[in-house]
Amino acid sequence: MRVVIVYLGVIVLLTSGVISLMANDISPESKLLGEWKEVSWEFEKLDETGGQEFWGISKSITDQLKKEISRELAFHEAETWKFYPDGKISLEGENGKRSSLFWRLKGRGHVLKLFGHADSIEHYQIQKLTEDTMEIHFNTDLQARGIVKMTFKKIMNQ
Amino acid sequence: MLRKFSNSRTLADNVKLGSLTAFSSGMVNVISVIIFFAFTSNVTGHYAVLAEEIAKGNWYQAGVVASWILLFFFGGFTANLIIINFNKTNSYLAHSVPIILEIICLLIVGSYIQFYYKESLVETEVLVGLMLFAMGIQNGLTASISNSAVKTTHLTGLTTDLGMLFSMFTKKEYRENKQLREKAKVQVTIMSSYLLGGIAAGLIYLNIAYNVFYIVCLFLLVVIGYDFYRLRVSRYVSASQPFLRIHYYGRNKKRNGKRNELQKV
């Protein structure tokens, strides 16, 4: 009987530990809802030797290169991403161009799935997601540089 | 495969059990990565992720990953609890019930994806948890009944063991050791089956999607059915052969009276 009580106690302790951890934070899905403004594009992995350049390739990405990289991607030229609770995402460009897609979170909330664009499904790694900042990583073979880091700031007046 | 326990198991028993269960766990792992972007047959990576999420202060994700690890733990716990409590009364049943539980978990996951899955994060977290529980059960069962010779859901320990074994095989005295050779056979079989299961799942997922879960269940049913069939055959043979029947009853202490009765006849 004593063993049963000890075991039940441990189970309750572990379960309450997990629940209290989750209760102290907001789910990534809720954090994601709202309007996000793209603030920077950078190469995440760059073999730096101290400065911002290596072999003549800059860590920051120019507008031209950005267009090249995102040419075939769902969020092409979009600068504001608006996530809705019903799983829809509205992408707005600087020129007022707007497109609507669908979003889902996968894994433990670390993978963003975008679909509804020309039958393609795209996955992006959410590296950082806080109340006001989001960092998305994805691979590109353009220039054979590897990972691109997109940083977003949340528009708080939403 | 399932009837025999610990040291009474033969190489063939372990190879059959290891290959079938490793194939199914390889399938489950690849499918979960494709559908949910999370590994479900091993927890080493989850420990690393848990530490990372705690360090980043992502408490929600840390809680999710911690619950996944706990579910794998409870899977092993449940499987072994069933075995140690019912092994003496009916070893086949004691070893089959954990597999039945695993099948139920995988059927729930497969059917849920087929009929209800809306790809919400909570659904993903719960389904991944259920799959980890199933894999914990499988790993607990195979490790328990084979005296830790067969572990089929992850390959870290197995790859280490294989590395050690192959280094030992550089010496003739170890190469000639039957036990070591048998161990290597079991490990290589598990490794290949796990890999094959993963490749098969990746390939057939393109055509049959979530139905892969039903195929995994089919493999697990073969594990249960094989021993059930063998039991039925051996009972039928011993019942129709008087000498074998005496031998069969002689093995069962509760039926010593029946044995004596048969001997008199």
Image (spheres, grey):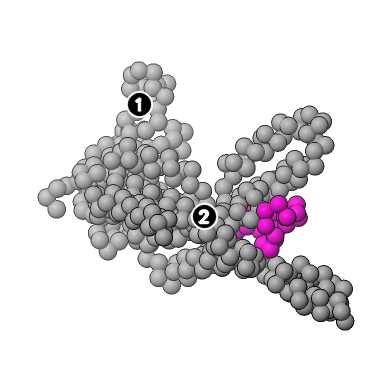
Q: Is residue A126 visible?
A: yes
**Residue drawn at the location 14% of the way across and 53% of the way down:** A158
> Magenta stretch?
B1-24
Q: Which residue is mark 1?
A: A58
**Which residue type does callout 1 highlight?**
Ser
Front residue of A143/A6: it is: A6
Distance of label 1 from label 2 (alpha carbons) = 51 Å
Q: Which residue is mark 2?
A: B76
Name which quarter of the figure residue A118 lies in. bottom left
Front residue of A17/B36: it is: A17
Give x and y (percent) for residue B151: 61, 50
Are discs 1 and 2 located on one and the same chain?
Answer: no
Report the label total: 2
Front residue of A51/B144: it is: B144
Name which quarter of the figure residue B4 lies in. bottom right
Residue B53 in the magenta stretch? The answer is no
Front residue of B157/A147: it is: B157
Question: Is residue B20 shown left or right of residue B214?
Answer: right
Residue B7 in the magenta stretch? The answer is yes
